[in-house]
Image (spheres, rainbow, N blue to C red):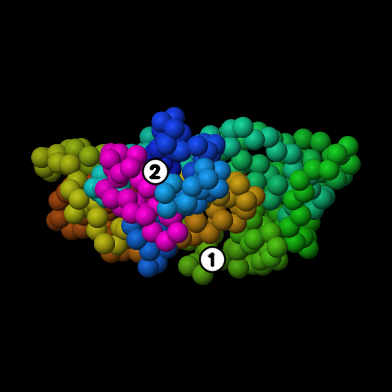
Amino acid sequence: MTPADLSRTVLHAVRRAVDEDALRAPVPARVRVERTRPGGSGDYACAVALQLAGPAALPALEVARILRERVVAEPGVGRVEITGPGFLSFTLDAPAESDRAVLAAVREQGLAYGHGDALRDEIHQFHHAREVRAAVTAQAVFRLLVAQGARGRTTCEQAPDPDWVRLGVTVNAYGTPPTPLTEIRPVPAGATAGELLERLGPDAARWGLLRAAGHDRAALGPELLVQGEANPLFRVRYAHARARALTRGAAALGFTAEAGAPTAHGESPTEPTATTVHDAAARPLLDLIADHPGILLAGARHRAPDRVARQLEAVAHAFFDFHDSCPPLPAGDEKPSAAHRARLAIAEAAGTVLAGGLSLLGIRAPEHL
């Protein structure tokens, strides 16, 4: 069960409780679940009972009890506890199966993994100054919203800078709007689009403009071009390129990440076991991959593409830790095994998440680096 699946499961429980007249409250449009914080109980937590307590005219603990009865027997949910003033804490059943579900979702959805329709009923129009960081940020926010099903457009105070096109920015209209619009006004970059393109090129320029939160000054120095670990953009793109290289290497050895695929040595196809999927070093990476849809949704809701950039940095860091501790490719005379196929599936999913996230930020993900 993925976090998105769990969110839908809880929302379904709320609907059932309302339909059965056990709970008299409006059904929310969505239910948010989050990873349990350090010291907490279970894998995920949800505060929906506290949200519904007022409208339902019931104590939050009673609302939590009503919802717990309707969630605890759902497939994939191992245990549901009520903690604190009324939080629901979930421990998912069969974690290996949950991991496989996440990896299968990434494989099936590809670069669209994490996209959804949570914001399908929303229409946004963003207005920004004739300034390169504002323009790039507005465009990135627009991409994130569209990926979550929303519709919208961007407008500028004045005619756009022609160089914005090379940064992937389009403006639907310009001028003073007849009614006030939501404004995108990050700290200005202090340089024009032409200057940034000349110094950094489009990819590094976009990363530098989007990586910092809007209220912080963007770092736009030559460090963005450094081909080394100290440069987060390089690490993210190199992690993606390395993941793609692993797929090519596995193909050369005659195996794939697909469960049950035959190997070059004629090994009997087997399903990866919980042990092979759950190498200790894989846990942080698997968790980040599972959390990716929630990060994209939060980035859209809060108009914060910097959240996506930081998520990609975390995925890249976890990917290299996993890659070094649990090599997805056999070495020497070692034969490809179920463990290698399971590890390769995780590495490929990480590469897909990195490519998809970079795409939403308008940045290329090279196959070779």
Give the quarter of the image for residue 260. Answer: top left
Residue 110 visible in the shown view? no
Chain part drawn in magenta: 64-91
Q: Secondary structure at mark 1?
A: loop
Q: Earlier in the sequence, mark 2 or mark 1?
A: 2
- Can residue 283 be seen in the rendering of this structure? yes
Nearest to the observer: residue 38 or residue 324: 38
The 10 Å Cα crowd at callout 1, few under 14, some 14 to 19, many 20 or more, is: few
Quarter where residue 170 is shown: top right
264 lies above or below 83:
above
Q: Is residue 152 left or right of residue 270?
A: right
Residue 94 placed where, x, y %?
A: 24, 47
Query: Residue at label 2?
Result: 67
Where is residue 366 shown, x and y percent of the image?
A: 49, 48
Residue 25, labelled with which disc?
none
Q: Amino acid at mark 2?
A: Leu
Q: CA distance from mark 2 to mark 1?
A: 46 Å
Q: Residue at x 61, y 59 (%)?
A: 211
Foreground residue among 322 and 302: 302
- Residue 259 location (% of width, % of height): 22, 39
The kind of secondary structure element at disc 2 is helix
Check disc 2: other Cα within 10 Å, few if <14, some if 14-19, many if 20+. many
Residue at 40%, 67% (x, y): give it.
38
Image quarter of the N terminus = top left
User: Residue 263: x, y in percent?
Assistant: 17, 41
Q: Residue at x 82, y 50 (%)?
A: 129
Q: Which mark is residue 231?
A: 1
